[in-house]
């Protein structure tokens, strides 16, 4: 008797069957070694770092003033809506791939591809930015011991020339150079790559140690810095709006919202938790817990640190590159600069580790579905049980970009990809609740219609208030993604197989 076969669904809205996710879990070659608190630590490891040690200075100095704390509140609220939706998805689909995997089973292939494509932007640009920031703090650490490495060895070509011209204008003699590379940024990326290739257990152990150092330092900053707060520095708490020559509003409510979009970069850690579901011991219960716990812990710490920093130093005098260390130096606590600088170096290392870890798991999920080349992005090392080729590819890309490119304005690019993915997830979990009401949900988002609606509106609003050039670049990146999808991914998708 012949078996009739129905044609393949070629629609861009075709969805991955939920039964296929269960099969992926069964076939996974990844080691399940992450506990509830191990996952939470990974989330904190990604969140506590660039946001506190770098972005606080930029956001307060140029956009929000003392109201930086409100920017963190706004960003935290927008993240909370998305985190509650993420938690429900993670309990249903405990697989690697994060928002990409969740939307593939609910909204459709094209939307899933766009989310995955923007998560690539999020993690790649995030890791690159952090690598350059790490290099800056490492250089500051060397300066504490009066070690002055040459400019051409510590900066990309553009930044090296800018610094050389500034120093020459100040009367210093700087030798000419024709070659420049940010060597520390390049090397730290390869150290992190080595750890990630060796295995998730090693990566998690390294991250746990660093998280303890970071959190202890942040608590020190809050407690010690509170004794040096001058409440006059909080007046006015919301500076009067200022419009620059491009039409962009600084300070005032609009400035606070723009600052919230900038510091949103700091919150992507809880998204990284969901990419590790394939390596969690009990993902259905532990991933939702870790997502919410890491977000709550880090939001409270961010608000406290921002209040302390803007109270210690006038917001317009905060250093743009190392605001925490500089604030303590300005009030005479020069000895603490050593501690803060070491913690920043360690903290940025763990952020980089979790971002690159999350990126390789996004690639793995997309490659398993046929949307990216499987032999590169889904190849698992026989001994280490890690996606080693993908990890090396990510390490090579991030290290090269970080070594030769000035990355002083890409944090908003990272935020744009995150905000888009978060808005999509809020809609997708609501859609799944309607379409599949009988699915087992170990965690259910409370008041889902309200939470999902607020999540969509809040994240899209923050995205709309990003800089114009950021939105244009985001649009260009999206167009490139569509070209890749229609020329490669759609033709190679696993969903092209005939169904019986």
Image (tube, rainbow, N blue to C red):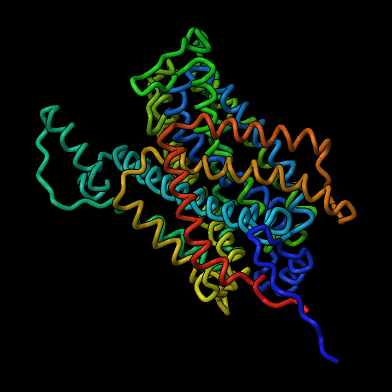
- Extreme-right residue of the structure: 438
| Picture quadrant where residue 105 is located | bottom right
Identity of the residue drawn at 21% across and 51% down: 180
- Extreme-bottom residue of the structure: 1
Image coordinates for residue 244, horizontal then vertical, percent = 36, 19
Q: Is residue 276 visible?
A: no
Q: Nearer the viewer, residue 373 or 393?
A: 373
Identity of the residue drawn at 40% across and 36% down: 469
Q: Nearer the viewer, residue 213 or 113?
A: 113
Image quarter of the C terminus: bottom right
> Where 65 falls versus 454 (above or below)?
above
> Where 82 falls versus 432 (above or below)?
above
Identity of the residue drawn at 55% across and 58% down: 357
> Where 285 falls versus 65 (above or below)?
below
Image coordinates for residue 131, horizontal then vertical, percent = 40, 49
Q: Is residue 199 shown left or right of residue 296?
A: left
Image coordinates for residue 17, horizontal then vertical, percent = 76, 65
> Where 140 falls versus 437 (above or below)?
above
Image coordinates for residue 401, horizontal then vertical, percent = 35, 53
Q: Is residue 261 shown left or right of residue 103?
A: left
């Amino acid at each position: 008797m012949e078996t009739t076969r129905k044609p393949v669904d070629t629609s861009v809205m075709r969805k991955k069957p939920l039964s296929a996710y269960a099969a992926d879990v069964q076939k996974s070659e990844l080691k399940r070694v992450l506990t509830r608190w191990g996952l939470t630590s990974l989330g904190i490891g990604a969140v506590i770092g660039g946001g506190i040690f770098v972005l606080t200075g930029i956001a307060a100095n140029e956009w929000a003033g003392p109201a930086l704390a409100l920017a963190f509140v706004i960003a935290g609220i927008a993240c909370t809506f998305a985190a509650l939706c993420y938690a429900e998805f993670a309990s249903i689909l405990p697989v690697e791939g994060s928002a990409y995997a969740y939307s593939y089973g609910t909204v459709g292939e094209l939307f899933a591809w766009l989310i995955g494509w923007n998560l690539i932007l999020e993690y790649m640009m995030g890791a690159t930015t952090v690598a350059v920031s790490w290099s800056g703090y490492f250089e500051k650490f060397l300066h504490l011991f009066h070690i002055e490495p040459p400019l051409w060895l510590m900066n990309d070509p553009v930044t090296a020339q800018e610094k050389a011209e500034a120093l020459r204008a100040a009367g210093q003699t700087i030798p000419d150079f024709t070659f420049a590379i940010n060597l520390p940024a390049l090397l730290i990326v390869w150290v992190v790559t080595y750890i990630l290739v060796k295995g998730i257990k090693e990566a998690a152990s390294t991250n746990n140690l660093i998280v303890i150092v970071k959190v202890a330092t942040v608590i020190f900053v809050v407690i010690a810095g509170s004794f040096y707060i001058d409440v006059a520095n909080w007046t006015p708490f919301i500076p009067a709006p200022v419009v620059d020559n491009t039409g962009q509003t600084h300070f005032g409510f609009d400035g606070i919202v723009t600052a919230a979009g900038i510091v949103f970069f700091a919150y992507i850690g809880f998204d990284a938790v969901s990419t590790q579901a394939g390596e969690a011991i009990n993902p259905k219960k532990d991933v939702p817990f870790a997502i919410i716990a890491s977000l709550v812990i880090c939001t409270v710490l961010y608000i406290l640190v921002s209040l302390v920093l803007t109270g210690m130093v006038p917001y317009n005098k905060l250093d743009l590159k190392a605001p925490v260390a500089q604030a303590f130096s300005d009030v005479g606590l020069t000895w603490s600069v050593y501690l803060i600088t070491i913690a920043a170096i360690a903290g940025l290392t763990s952020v980089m580790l979790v971002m690159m870890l999350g990126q390789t798991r996004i690639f793995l999920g997309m490659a398993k579905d046929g949307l990216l080349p499987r032999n590169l992005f889904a190849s698992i090392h026989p001994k280490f049980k890690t996606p080693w080729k993908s990890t090396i590819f990510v390490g090579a890309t991030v290290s090269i970009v970080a070594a030769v490119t000035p990355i002083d304005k890409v944090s908003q690019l990272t935020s744009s990809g995150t905000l888009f993915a978060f808005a999509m997830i809020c809609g997708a979990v609501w859609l799944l609740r309607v379409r599949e009401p009988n699915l087992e949900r170990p965690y259910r988002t409370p008041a889902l219609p309200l939470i999902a609606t607020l999540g969509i509106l809040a994240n899209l609003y923050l995205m709309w208030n990003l800089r114009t050039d950021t939105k244009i670049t985001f649009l260009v990146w999206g167009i490139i993604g569509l070209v890749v999808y229609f020329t490669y991914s759609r033709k190679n998708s696993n969903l092209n197989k005939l169904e019986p």
